[in-house]
Structures are given as C-alpha cells and as structure tokens.
Amino acid sequence: MNTVIFGGSGFVGSRLARLLVEAGGHVTIPTRDRERAKRNLIVLPNTDLVGCDPTNARSVETLCNNADVVINLLGVLHETSNASFEKIHVDCVRLISDAASRSGRVRHLLHVSAINATPGAPSKYLRSKGKGEALISKLRRPNWTIIRPSLLFGEGSDFCALVRWQIDRLPVLALPCAAARFQPLHVDDLARMIAGCIFDPQVYGKALLAGGPDKLSLREIYDAFQAVAGRKRVIVPLPPSLSGLMAGCMELVPFLPPLLTRDNVASMSLPKVCEAGNGAERIDGQLISLADFLAATRLRQDSARALEYRRFRHGARRG
C-alpha cells in the first residue's frame, strides 16, 4: 500500500510516516525542499521523498494516481507573501481533492483541519480551514475523513519551545488570551489516530474532533511549564482588547515572522476543546497528558545532565 502524505516532512507528518513504515506500508512524501526533508526522513525504509509543488495541479495529480491513501497535513498558522491561508488551506486542498477524486486508485483521503473550522468563523485561519473542509465533504469518491485536532505539543513543537524560552528568560510575562481554552494533544497520539483511521470504514464521511485527556486554559498551560521548570514567573493576563493590541504591535516588527497576530487572537476567542466527543480516544492506550510529557522531558534532561557531570568528574580524576 502506498500512502502519499502532503506535509509529510513536518511536525506531524514525520511521526506519521514512521508509524506507517513500521506497519509495513510504503510512504511517499512530496516536498519542495528535498534536502531539508532528508534530515529526518532519509533513514526510513520504504519512503520516497519526491520534489513537488503542492500548488501545481499536474504534480499533485501524478502523485495521487499512484496512491492508495492520500493524507493532507498542509497548514500554516501565519500568512506570508508565498503562503496565504487561502492558497494553502483552500487552493491546495482543491487540487488534492480533485486529483484524488479523479484517480481510480485512491481509496481513502484523510484531511487534517482544525477545531472550529467553519466558513463563518471569526478568524481568516479558521474560515480558510472551513472552506477546505467544505471541498472535502462534497467528494463522492474516494472515501474521506476530516480530523480536527486541538493544540499540539511534543518534542520539536514550536509552541513548547516558545513557552520554555519565555519562562527561562522573562521574569514577567504579559499573556494574551490567557483564558483561551484548549485540549492539548500529543503529536504522537494524533499520528496514531490518523494511522488508525486509514482502514476503518466507520470513519468514512465523518469529521472527528481530536484532543488530549485534559482541558486547560492558556494560563494553566503556562503554569504547567512553570511547575516543571521550577520557576515562578509573574504572569499578567491580558484582556481581549489588549491582546489584540499586543498582536498588532508584533505584526509591525520588521524582518521577523510575528509570534502572535490579530488573526491568532480572533481564532483563540473560540474554545479548542472536544465538546461533541473526542475521536482521539479511539486509539489503543492512554492519551499522553501535557503534565506527563513535561515531567518525562524534565527527567530525560536531568538524566542527561547527571551523565555529563559523571563524565566530567571521571575525566577530572584522570587528570
């Protein structure tokens, strides 16, 4: 079985590719930057990295014609001149869904979207995701499934790296959207959920919410990072008006991508929680909580520091 994963070299895709290969499948990963993608994926057997522009209809169609399963993980949180929400979340989805529909081989199309993705959502990000979902849900063939995850965390997460940096470096934190609600989901759990959906006819034609075991505010998430780091910072929650003002100022910083935009603030005005059932609970085993992940990460770091210290002492005694 050949699975094509659009966005397969990213945070979720690299883990999903490994799962599928370990299960005996063949994976094809389209990428614009093959050399960069090779860093994490070249060691995987039965994996092809193919140069492809997902905005090119012919390239997308060629890939889908050779696929049994197509998975779309393409997404951006911040718009750039080369990657707008409309281009990535709508135009690329249209090309992928059209190509999968015309292919006589594709049996299942899985599309990863976002909680609260609707054409009438308060943010451009969520509206564009909603338009992409609408394209998928209109397909008569192949079978399709939409997965809407909450906030993702795990090793290599930009979000985790940002929070850790803030807690390490800043004695006072002005926290926008502190009351925003999330159901943080470990990236490995999302990858397992997607893999488990591939052969399950019960998920055909459905949109599944996906979250972790706990529902937390953004402030509670920061508190969890603080507790594990052993640091107590002064956190100043910002109301919506000041959150939008802060985001607008960040957008004006030249030469750097904004850490927060007004569109992000609008998106966080809606809770990212699984109110209508959590599809991630269908996977085998217990979902990984943010607290357990942070504790395990701290334990590994402490063990690594202790080992380095023992090596240093051993070397000193030899001197």
Image (cartoon, grey):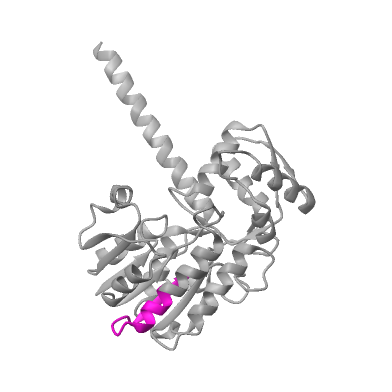
Residue closest to the far top: 319
At 20% from the left and 59% from the top, the residue drawn is 45
Q: Tell me the magenta residue range.
A: 96-112
Residue 121 coordinates in the image, percent (x, y): 67, 69
Q: In which quarter of the image is the C terminus?
A: top left
Counting from the top left corner in percent of width and height, residue 56 is at 38, 66
Instruction: Tell me which corner region of the image, top left, top right, bottom left or bottom right, holds residue 17.
Output: bottom left
Q: Position of residue 23 (x, y in %)?
A: 26, 68
Quarter of the image with the N terminus in it: bottom left
247 w.r.t. 255: above or below? below
Q: Residue furthest bottom?
A: 140
Residue sitting at 33 percent across and 71 percent down?
58
Query: Who is closer to the viewer here, 157 or 309?
Result: 157
Is residue 273 something one can see in this rendering?
A: no
Q: Please check the rendered image and state whether residue 108 is part of the magenta-colored stretch, yes or no.
A: yes
Q: In this view, does 266 lie above or below 58?
A: above
Quarter of the view holding residue 211:
bottom right
Q: Residue at x 44, y 47 (%)?
A: 296
Q: In which quarter of the image is residue 256?
A: top right
Residue 184 is a magenta residue = no
**For this view, does 166 lie left or right of residue 94?**
right
Q: Is residue 266 visible?
A: yes
x and y, in percent, of residue 80 in the image: 54, 52
Position above or below: 300 against 104: above
73 displayed left or right of 121: left
